[in-house]
Image (cartoon, helix red, strand yellow):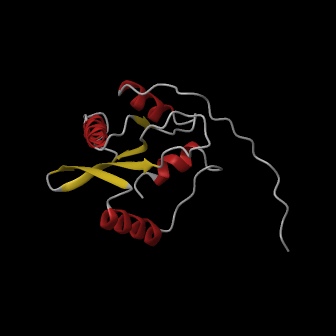
Amino acid sequence: MANVERHIQLAPDTYRIPDAEAVRRHFEEVLADGSKVLISVAEVAGEVVGMAELVLLALPPDHQILVPRRAAEIHTVVLDGHRGCGVGSTLVVAAERSAADRGISIIYAGIFAPNEGAVGFYSASGFGPRGILLSKEQEVPSVG
């Protein structure tokens, strides 16, 4: 939830404030399961100041032309006041180690272009472009 305000300021038409209860349930479920999402946290003086969420992706289906490789998406959050101190970089390194231990050879950091801070952060951590994701918004007829 600490990350919401920053994203809404970047692109209010793209981001929203999720229900806090839904966020809590999500993390309870992934922590209980542990097979699809790996979470690393950073603490300073007993307070959680950052986290990296590594979402494990399914292998491409047999009918696709992509070479099957284990992959994951990473989402990193560091609280204001702790950014620029190495917390995020440490979390990414821990996530990369966890991924490698599970045979994951590709980590994606999906970032919307207006989030220049995140682009810079992940670029400094060795992430680079891998293809281009194009999108097109379309009119959706109202149901009623």
Number of marks in the image?
0
Image quadrant of residue 98? Answer: top left
Q: Looking at the rendering, in which quadrant would you find the C terminus?
A: bottom right
Q: Position of residue 53 (x, y in %)?
A: 36, 50
Image quadrant of residue 140? Answer: bottom right
Residue at x-position 48% and y-position 38%: 68
Q: Is residue 2 left or right of residue 102?
A: right
Residue at x-position 42% and y-position 43%: 72
Residue at x-position 51% and y-position 33%: 67
Q: Height in image: 130 above or below 90?
A: above
Give whichever of 99, 80 is nearer the camera.
99
Residue at x-position 35% and y-position 68%: 28
Outermost residue to the left: 45
Q: Position of residue 13 (x, y in %)?
A: 66, 50
Q: Position of residue 1 (x, y in %)?
A: 42, 58
Give whichever of 93, 103 is nearer the camera.
103
Q: Height in image: 14 above or below 29?
A: above
Image quadrant of residue 84? Answer: top left
Q: Position of residue 91 (x, y in %)?
A: 28, 41
Outermost residue to the bottom: 144
